[in-house]
Image: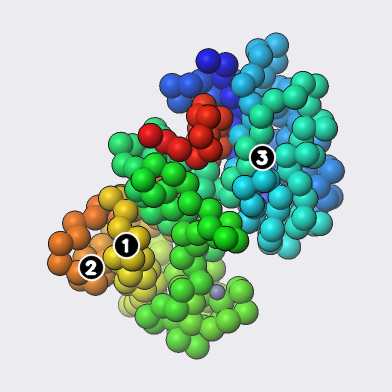
Amino acid sequence: MRPVVGIDLGGTKTAAALVAADGTLGVRAEAPTPAAEGPDAVLAVVAGLVARVAGETPIGGVGIGTAGIVDAAGRVISATETFTGWVGTDLVAGLSARLPRSVPIRVYNDVDAHLLGEAWCGAARGHSSVLMVAVGTGVGGALLIDGRLVRGAHGAAGEIGHVPAVGADGLRCPCGRYGHLEALAAGPSIARSYLLATGNSVDARGVLTLARRGDPDAAAVVRAAAVGLGRAIAGLVTTIDPSCVVIGGGVAEAGELWWRPLREAFRAELVAGFATPLVKAELGVAAAVLGAARGLFDDDEGALT
Ligand SMILES: [Zn+2]
């Protein structure tokens, strides 16, 4: 089976790798993402990376995991302001036009790609129903049910960031509403809560460091973020019943200070009979590249079993 090029298209950089059918990573390359220059510039970079990692190797397709919400046909439905003119871009047509040969192209949201990677080769290996939660500059999510990636009517299935959350009352969410999980649990939200509590402007990493050093305000903020997240995840778990929850993103690197209250709140909220494990993502930056490539090895889109 021909290898596939997996692409992780992020707001600041784009990574690419040749991926074999057994999940082995071959040639890798990356480049800054010219997000502010518009879709043409971004697609030119993606096409250039495909050419660099494929070289003379015949490839079986290209899988892209991209920031923003995309539909199954590869059209961008919504994106952050980082990407100029990104909404409405047809990534399949745009990339096809820039490749020397016609190959199948699949496009996923980056968290969906991350989930597919972890379910294929990482922390959720062997699980066919998985909830992925990515906690970083935002709170994203993705859903695999019975071996199939679930996209939903708006490409947003599994996106847990905008559920009402315990402890988030009165906090403004980036979506413009109040009281959502992202307004409490994302990295910038942790920094903002600390600013509100103390008047001190420190980024999320700084708040975590202060909490580790025993700063009671920092510890309270981190704990509130973790507890709100744990309870929200428990609610989603009882609704969709995955066999495993994978937590990734920068905030998941916070250590036990954050993980312990997260696990405790999650366990306390779960109804009897659920023993769903909460595990840390393992593959780091490779996850989205692997996951984006994964679907090209199947006839059946997104199927892992
Ligand atoms: Zn929101």
Lower sequence index among marks 2 and 1? 1
N-terminal label among 3 and 1: 3
Earlier along the polypeptide chain: callout 2 or callout 3? 3
User: Residue at position x 56%, y 77% from top?
Assistant: 173
Q: Residue at x 63, y 42 (%)?
A: 107
| Kind of residue sitting beneath label 2 | Leu
- In the rendered image, the quadrant that contains the C terminus is top left
Residue that carries the numbered disc 1 in the rendered image: 237
Viewer-nearest of discs 2 and 3: 2
The reply to whether callout 2 and callout 1 are in contact (CB within 8 Å) is yes
> Is the C-beta separation of discs 3 and 1 under 8 Å?
no
Amino acid identity at mark 3: Thr
For residue 260, side relative to residue 6 (left or right) = left
x and y, in percent, of residue 6 in the image: 59, 32
Asked which secondary structure carries label 1, the reply is helix
Is residue 304 positioned above or below 38 on the image? above
Residue at numbered disc 2? 270
- Look at label 1 and name its amino acid: Val
Spatial CA distance of label 2 from label 1 is 8 Å
SS label for mark 2: loop
The label shown at residue 14 is 3
**Percent coordinates x, y for residue 227 in the rendering:** 32, 72
Considering every residue shown, the one lying at the far bottom of the view is 170
